[in-house]
Amino acid sequence: MSEIPTTILVVDDDEFTAELTGMVLEAADYTVVIAVGGMEALEVMAQDPTVRMVVSDMNMPFINGIQLFSELREQGYNQPFILLTGDDAAPLRVAHPDMDAVLTKDEDLQEALPNLVESLLLRD
């Protein structure tokens, strides 16, 4: 990894869950910015040019993870986007092949998420 910290935006309407996801990424030496919900995420993206990736919950009020992904792409943001879901990820992967990744929030997330983040950043 480079000397410059990689900033990842974590989006979740549940602040506790966002903090837990952030801790997983911080343990892997990433810098984390948390947005509580999709509206706040759009504000963060507009104000923080250092964000290199977005990790978002699927089920949020007002703007869900898929809508957030679409809105960011419409606004010209092309950072890798990982969607986290408490449901089965496979149908979402099939329905949204343009999304970089969809992960299920389960016991494997602590290991799977940092590995996926690293592989997407290396691809970028």
Image (tube, rainbow, N blue to C red):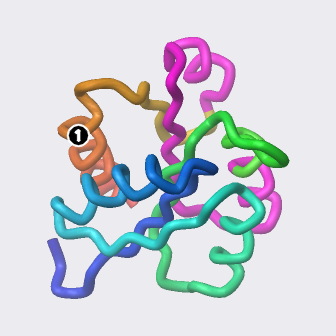
- On the image, the x and y values in percent for residue 42 come to 73, 68
Q: Pointer 1: what residue?
A: 110
Query: What residue occupies the far front of the structure in this picture?
Result: 16
In this image, 41 relative to 74: left or right? left
Residue type (three-letter) at the residue carrying disc 1? Gln
Which one is in front, 33 or 15?
Answer: 15
Q: Residue at x 54, y 62 (%)?
A: 79
Element under disc 1: helix
Front residue of 110/68: it is 110
The image quarter in which residue 26 lies: bottom left
Please tell me whether residue 75 belongs to the stretch shown in magenta. Answer: yes
Q: Can you say which quadrant of the picture contains the C terminus?
A: bottom left
Picture quadrant of residue 113 = top left
Q: Residue at x 24, y 49 (%)?
A: 114
Give the left or right position of residue 115, taking residue 12 as reference: left
Q: Give the image quarter of residue 49.
A: bottom right
Badge 1 density bin: few <14, some 14–19, many ≥20, Cα 10 Å? some
Position of residue 24 in the picture relative to residue 64 (left or right): left
For the magenta stretch, what is the residue range?
69-97
The location of residue 90, given as percent across then percent down, is 51, 14
| Residue 104 in picture, x, y percent from top left | 43, 25
Q: Residue at 68% across / 56% down in the picture?
A: 37
